[in-house]
Amino acid sequence: AQTVTQSQPEMSVQEAETVTLSCTYDTSESNYYLFWYKQPPSRQMILVIRQEAYKQQNATENRFSVNFQKAAKSFSLKISDSQLGDTAMYFCAFMKHPNFGNEKLTFGTGTRLTIIP
Amino acid sequence: DVKVTQSSRYLVKRTGEKVFLECVQDMDHENMFWYRQDPGLGLRLIYFSYDVKMKEKGDIPEGYSVSREKKERFSLILESASTNQTSMYLCASTEKGRAPFTDTQYFGPGTRLTVL
């Protein structure tokens, strides 16, 4: 079974600064996907960024980037130039490569990020 | 845009009541999921379905059942609600994975259930 660990329950950072959220996982799979999801207060969960394990290049989406260290089983999220709208709960999630399209996500416990004006 | 809707944002029920939580998606997705979200525990998978009338247990299925009679609708049923089922319930859907895998799970807004 897979496990996902987020060791930072809460973080806060000043607006415009850079913040890194940590995530580690444990799996025996070689082919899998990793995700960061964002859940703003009272709003729907949305995908922030996705990384395929077979790709060595770190994924990037505008101000969001990841540091994927496969050997260390680490998948951290970096938010650059943080904005007030980044205030949310962030979840790291793992999915092994789907067989016949039946995929399940395993989530970490989340990090509550607050951007301070 | 994919839309996943849930029947209620807030629900209050009494212990022992039968509770139905409904989820509907409008993108013809094959896979649908029910999670519960609790502080400090993250999201935990209750049940999922990869086709009409098909269901599989997730990590915490005890005390729950599901129904998927139509592709767009996935219902979570609490046969006899208990106080330890007070939680936020999230529904999600995704198209069946195919290479190259690009699909992600789309989430509904959640139902906050309180069992008194």
Image (tube, rainbow, N blue to C red):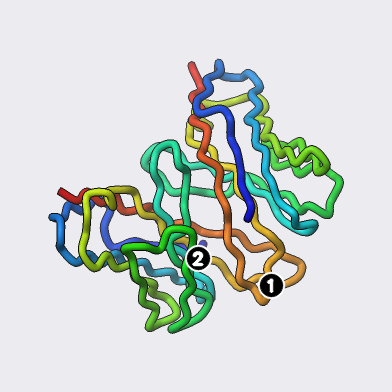
- Residue B15: image tag: none
Q: Is residue A43 above or below residue B68?
A: above
Q: Is residue B115 left or right of residue B102?
A: left
How packed mark 2 is, by other alpha carbons closer than 10 Å (few <14, some 14-19, many 20 or more), is many
The residue under the point 47% across, 49% down is B43
Q: Chain of mark 2?
A: B
Question: Residue visible at 34% across and 70% down?
Answer: B65
Return the mark for residue B93. Answer: 2
Instruction: Indicate the position of residue B57 as horizontal and vertical percent values.
Output: 47, 68
Q: Closer to the observer: label 1 or label 2?
A: 1
Secondary structure beneath label 2? strand
Q: Name the residue that disc number 1 marks.
A: A99
A4 or A89: nearer the viewer: A4
Name which quarter of the figure residue A97 lies in. bottom right
> Residue B92, how many percent across, how many down?
47, 61
State the residue in front, B19 or B16. B16
For the point 43% across and 83% down, the residue is B53
At label 2, the amino acid type is: Ser
Q: Quadrant of the N terminus of chain A?
A: bottom right
Image coordinates for residue A39, horizontal then vertical, percent = 47, 42
Chain letter for mark 1: A
Location of residue B71 (image quadrant): bottom left
Establish if B102 lies above or below A74.
Answer: below
* Image side of residue B85 versus residue B42, left or right: left
Say which element carries label 1.
loop
Q: Residue at x 25, y 51 (%)?
A: B113
Q: Amino acid at mark 1?
A: Asn
Total marks placed: 2
Q: Is residue A35 above or below residue B50?
A: above
Is A26 positioned to the left or the right of A72 in the image?
left
Q: Is residue A16 left or right of residue B111?
A: right
